[in-house]
Image: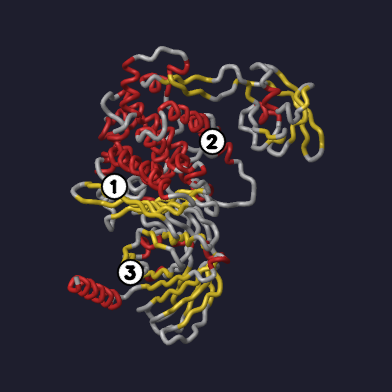
Amino acid sequence: MRLHKFKILLLTLCFTSISYAQSYINYDISFDNAAQHEAEIKVSFTKIKKGAFSFRMSRSSPGRYAIHEFAKNVYNVKATNSKGEPLEITRQNPYQWDVDNHDGTVIVTYTLFANRGGGTYAQIDETHAHLNIPATFMFAPSLKETPIQVTFNPRKDWKIATQLKPMFDNTYYAPNMQYFMDSPTELSNHLVRSFEVESDGEKLNVKLALHNIGTEAEADEYFESVKKIVLQEMAVFGELPKFDYGEYVFLACYVPNASGDGMEHRNSTVVTSTRTLANGGMKGNLGTVSHEFFHSWNVERIRPQSLEPFNFEEANMSGELWFAEGFTSYYTNLFLTRAGLMSQENYINSLNGTFNYVWNSPGRSFFNPIEMSYQAPFVDAATSVDPVNRGNTFISYYSYGSALGLALDLALRNEKGNLNLDDFMKSVWKTYGKKEKPYTVDDLNQALNKYAGELFGNYYFSHFVYKSAMPNYKPLFKRVGIVLKRNSEKVFLGVSTSDGVVRNNAQIGSPAYKVGINSGDKIIAIDNHVVGDRNSVNTILSNYKIGDTATIQFSRYDQLRSVKVKLIKDPSYTIMTYEKSGLEVTPEMLKNRKEWLDKK
């Protein structure tokens, strides 16, 4: 036993001495003032070339595509040389600091304020340090290939969970800046659950680091659901990705001080919610788990060329997000269904929202799925103060891609018989993801041609990706015993209201749009029906028929106006099973549905 301890000590000393012999960027972070959401951070840059040296905060974050300007929460910035002598700092722009007269070493200290616990920002308080690395640590662009050591100084009872490689004590390793910035870290008194999966001849560990106000039993129950999701996703590809250090970790924060979010990373994911497991999270948080874990294949390794390398100094634009995010969104609830965590009836009902949002949006007349993806820097947690018209011009690439994934899956099963989206994704994985060869939209087109034939592949891309046509879903749904129909009786005005106040821009082409009703207007009455608490706009309109003309009185800027509108048919669809709609479902339909939705 003594010999064993001696060997461990010797190996530790050797590893430590080797690590210090190599040139590293060294970070140190502590949380003495966590109650005020502050961290104190020190970073040592060494072996710097003579001349001006720049260090900065990131403006973007992996998995996000907009600008976030993390420098706004950094202050008390100071710099010294290797002897501790102060260095003069100048600012060339809001997110960069420069020093000139260094001696090859620059040691920077600063204070970080952080109070948003999600996937993009950082949060520090007495319960945890939830760190998104770009929102936390400065970096030097000139040293982007230099290995990194980071030492976390946790508060009492805090443990550390991260995809960074453990070195010694509370010190972790990243091979370069890109990996470091992609490695969120959770310090808290969290519970840990893990299981081992054999994949491609290797044993890989999947871990849940759960920061939740709850019991051990709740953690056990939740982790069983997580395991089911992991195994169903693995069934699509036949293997897990080769996690760089043999482990994948879910960084789950289900606490009231968090914000709802999910953010994928190479060997980990952040999943956060204000819902604890006992307060709706046991089921409600699983969709984020399903979505983000699928990203370990689709987007982290099946990687768009447009995101390589990720740019931490600018916004990141990609035309492939309809596939990277959208197809992942299609699979989100599908995996919950296959894992037995969502009923097939509920899954089919869940298709209604996305389907109607995508195919009834005027945005399709302006942008195709590729161009919708280009909008990410303006919509992906981006902020602005001026009003926009995105309700008419934009369709989320999450939803658009999900609707296209559904159409492709059903079309492959319907038109090709023995083909399906699972096997197509597996073929893309083998060609691009497993080899970590980035792809373009044309590469996806050619991959579908190879899988399903040129006629099928080129038709799909030319009509639904390069253009904005709507697939013919009716025969696709019919094969699996699902009815698609229009709402034939309801009338449509084209705006949403609350207490009579119009809450959105009028939909292009709608009755409200044609007569000039718009966001902010307050509808007072429709004909002789006064809008009130018990008589909403929708309640009044439910008494009208398609083609009826109504006089609408509304207030704008304290002036009363009156217009006449001709009400049209509600453009929305209803998706339901044959059984629910009262139609006879055939054994063949049930067989096809089973192949689509059952456990793999």
The quadrant in which residue 102 appears is: bottom left
Q: Which mark is residue 433?
A: 1
Residue 20 to residue 162: above or below: below
The amino acid at mark 2 is: Gly
Percent coordinates x, y for residue 52 in the rendering: 44, 78
Work out how far the residue at label 1 is from the one at label 2, CA to CA, in angstroms: 32 Å
Residue denoted by label 3: 147
Percent coordinates x, y for residue 188 in the rendering: 45, 60
Secondary structure found at label 3: loop
* Quadrant placement of the C terminus: top left
Q: Nearer the viewer, residue 78 or 378?
A: 78
Residue drawn at point x = 53 percent, y = 61 percent: 69
The amino acid at mark 1 is: Gly
Secondary structure found at label 2: helix
Residue 135 to residue 284: above or below: below
The quadrant in which residue 345 appears is: top left
Q: Which mark is residue 363?
A: 2
Q: Which mark is residue 382?
A: none
